[in-house]
Amino acid sequence: MSLRSPLARVRGLGSAKQGSHHWWMQRLTAVALLVLSLWFVISVLQLGTMSHEEIRSWMSEPLSTVLFLVMLVALYYHASLGVQVVIEDYVESEWVKVASLVLTKFIAFFAAAVAVYSVIKVSVGI
């Protein structure tokens, strides 16, 4: 017999109180990536015939830069969440699990920082 209410079971608030938040973030970033990827593919198809300077000009537009940055941050965050789930589910050794999770977060953060820096560098024209 459980003392938890049906609402508590639905919300998924277990002992760590983070299960539903992780699930929601993964779903929200997936939807955001779906929309942003569609925008990105359409933009790249239109850029196919442009010169290098025209592409830099397009990248320096605020809307293009912001959408691209949001897509990159959502992409790396979504990937990090997905890898975290795989590690938590399939790695048995606790110290390997913790080390893998920390390494995954560092790699995702570093890769996202490099990508964001690159986009800003191109959009500013440095």
Image (tube, rainbow, N blue to C red):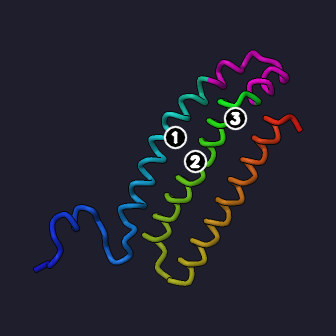
Query: How many marks overall?
Result: 3
Q: Measured along the vertical axis of the image, is residue 86 above or below residue 48? A: below
Q: Quadrant of the N terminus?
A: bottom left
Q: Earlier in the sequence, mark 2 or mark 3?
A: 3
| Disc 3: CA contacts within 10 A as few (<14), some (14-19) or many (>=20) | some
Q: Residue at x 22, y 67 (%)?
A: 8
Q: Measured along the vertical axis of the image, is residue 49 above or below residue 121? A: above
Task: Give the left or right position of residue 115, taking residue 89 as reference.
Answer: right
Q: CA distance from mark 2 to mark 1?
A: 7 Å
| Disc 2: CA contacts within 10 A as few (<14), some (14-19) or many (>=20) | many
Magenta part of the protein: which range? 43-59
- Residue 45: mark in rendering: none
- Residue 33: mark in rendering: 1
- Residue 75: mark in rendering: 2
Q: Nearer the viewer, mark 3 or mark 1?
A: 3
Q: Position of residue 109 (x, y in %)?
A: 67, 60
Q: Three-letter amino acid code at disc 2? A: Leu
Q: Three-letter amino acid code at disc 1? A: Leu
The answer to whether the residues at label 2 and label 1 have Cβ atoms under 8 Å apart is yes
Residue marked by disc 3: 65
View extreme (right): residue: 126
Q: Residue at x 71, y 59 (%)?
A: 110
